[in-house]
Image (cartoon, rainbow, N blue to C red):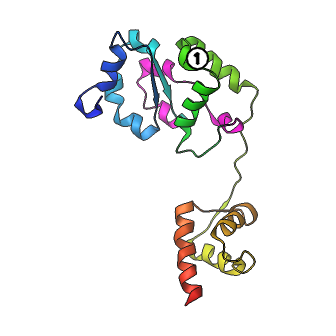
């Protein structure tokens, strides 16, 4: 079904043949389809399950917020840890594989998620210093030999030992620049 052909989600949810619609979308995508979701009637909400982040909840129309499965950072303490970007997909996977939630009513699905997360504690996210590219490059230069120039080991050093925040793509760019600098 094409999303750009009109209110595809609303059509799918309101179709009598549809038993359940499971949407795993980050906030940005939910914002893009919020108009479509607005067209889902309250009577169709029983079929809909939405998996998203805390931020994504705001993009869901008020009358459908009860369809949001109550996943939060405690999901990281399960067998489904990962990145913030893939949170909705991981929550959906947990819902299907661990809870068999696709077979449950909306009320029982919400209850199953709540119960599954109840005894879990969200892992603490370490506070890491934010440094500029040149400061990070200097840290890497100073530790290049100790880690044999290994990008994997240097990134772990940066995050775990030096406690410096650095996104992987940014790290790769800085590391490549150092490789060129140190080999010339």
Residue at the (60%, 12%) spot, across then down: 108
Q: Can you say whether 81 is above or below 135 in the image? A: above
> Residue, x 54% and y 75% (percent of image)?
176
Residue displayed at 72% across by 81% down: 145
Query: Left or right of 4: which side holds 150?
Result: right
Q: Position of residue 9 (x, y in %)?
A: 34, 24
Which residue appears at 57% of the width and 25% of the height?
Answer: 96
Crowding around mark 1 (Cα neighbors within 10 Å: few <14, some 14 to 19, many 20+) is many
As drawn, the residue found furthest toward the left would be 5
Please state the total of marks drawn on the protein image: 1
Q: Nearer the viewer, residue 19 or 87?
A: 19
Quadrant in which the C terminus is drawn: bottom right
Is 103 in front, or is 110?
103
Q: Quadrant of residue 181?
A: bottom right
Q: What stretch is highlighted in magenta?
A: 55-79
Q: Quadrant of residue 5?
A: top left
Residue 53 seen in render? no
Q: Can residue 120 be seen in this view?
A: yes
Quickly name the residue at label 1.
109
Q: Nearer the viewer, residue 43 or 180?
A: 180
Left/right placement of residue 99 relative to residue 37 reads right
């Amino acid at each position: 079904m094409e999303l750009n052909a009109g209110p595809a989600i609303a059509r799918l949810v309101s179709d009598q043949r549809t038993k359940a619609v499971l949407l795993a979308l980050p906030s940005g995508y939910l914002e893009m389809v919020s108009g479509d979701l607005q067209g889902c009637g309250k009577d169709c909400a029983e079929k809909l399950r939405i998996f998203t982040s805390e931020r994504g909840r705001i993009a869901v129309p008020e009358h459908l917020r009860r369809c949001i499965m109550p996943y939060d950072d405690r999901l990281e303490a399960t067998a489904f840890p990962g990145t913030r970007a893939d949170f909705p997909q991981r929550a959906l996977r947990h819902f299907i594989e661990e809870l068999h939630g696709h077979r449950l009513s909306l009320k029982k699905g919400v209850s199953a998620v709540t119960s599954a997360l109840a005894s879990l504690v969200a892992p603490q996210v370490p506070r890491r210093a934010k440094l500029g590219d040149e400061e990070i490059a200097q840290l890497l230069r100073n530790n290049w030999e100790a880690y044999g120039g290994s990008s994997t080991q240097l990134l772990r050093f940066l995050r775990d030992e030096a406690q410096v925040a650095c996104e992987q793509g940014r790290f790769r760019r800085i590391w490549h620049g150092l490789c060129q600098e140190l080999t010339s």
